[in-house]
Amino acid sequence: MITLTDVHKAFGANRVLRGINLTVPTGKSMVIIGGSGTGKSVLLKCILGLVTPEQGRIEVDGEDVGHARGGADRDAFLARFGMLFQGAALFDSLTVWQNVAFRLLRGAQKLPRAEARDIAIDKLRRVGLKPEVADLFPAELSGGMQKRVGLARAIAAAPEIIFFDEPTTGLDPIMSGVINELIREIVVEMGVTAMTITHDMTSVRAIADRVAMLHGGLIRWEGAVGDLDASGDPYVDQFIHGRAEGPIESVR
């Protein structure tokens, strides 16, 4: 579904991506791991066309992302994606159902409000929230509930591809487990292609089919989640076990 070939991106003298090669299979869950500041979010932005690489090619379902830079092509391209943002990123001034139905109420496929609300309530149920939550505002919800609303929004328009940005950040271990289970169920149930960036190794093992480690602007290792512990790569080994000593230098 997603193919990156020799992708480079720099910001001034800071070379963030230095030749990324990665394939994300259709209908599978790919998790990108790596330390803070290694370019994981930049990678997602390049795929979405929010950032333009200086070199390389990015294809989504066989089509070059570069063609979808504006107008109707851009809208159609983005309509294929759903996104769960770090911290949920809900709109404070909108009710829960309006947040979930945000895309459904706008653009070329704009739905009547009543229909959009029904879909939103159905998606809220799918993530374990009762219909009574629909008319509340984000500030009235706990962090875990906000994350569920963000997940409901990500799936509301039935996307083919969903990006998850640090889906369990700020959540306690129990709620993190709930979110991980929901993500895994939804990916399997909807048959979507998923791409997640996270530091949480519990999440990695719960939701990944495949794992790729980004370090130094390159994919250091990529393989099945079951092969993670036997990767044989010292960078991967240090990261997944949280060791201070190793090839990844820590800031002291």
Image (spheres, helix red, strand yellow):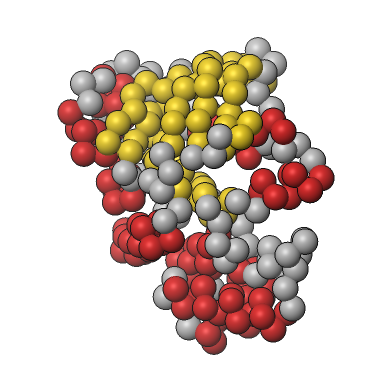
**Quarter of the rendering occupied by the C terminus:** top left
Q: Residue 236, image x and y in percent? A: 29, 26
Is residue 34 shown above or below 180?
Answer: above
Is residue 133 shown above or below 163?
Answer: below
Please, which residue is most extreme toward the top here?
A: 13
Residue 235 shows in this picture: yes
Is residue 176 found left or right of 162 in the rendered image?
A: left
Q: Residue 26, image x and y in percent? A: 43, 44
Q: What residue appears at the point 73 percent right and 65 percent down from the top-left corner?
A: 109
Q: Residue 111, image x and y in percent? A: 72, 73
Quadrant of residue 184 within the rendered picture: bottom left
Residue 137 shows in this picture: no
Is residue 159 found left or right of 53 in the rendered image?
A: left
| Count of numbered marks | 0
Q: What residue appears at the point 18 percent right and 28 percent down from the top-left corner?
A: 230
Q: What residue appears at the point 29 percent right and 51 percent down from the top-left corner?
A: 206
Please, which residue is most extreme toward the front here?
A: 62
Is residue 115 shown above or below 180?
Answer: below
**32 vs 11, nearest the viewer:** 32
Please, which residue is most extreme toward the right here?
A: 71
Please, which residue is most extreme toward the bottom here?
A: 132
Q: Residue 213, image x and y in percent? A: 38, 29
Q: What residue appears at the point 60 percent right and 63 percent down from the top-left corner?
A: 157
Is residue 140 shown above or below 204?
Answer: below
**201 vs 30, nearest the viewer:** 30
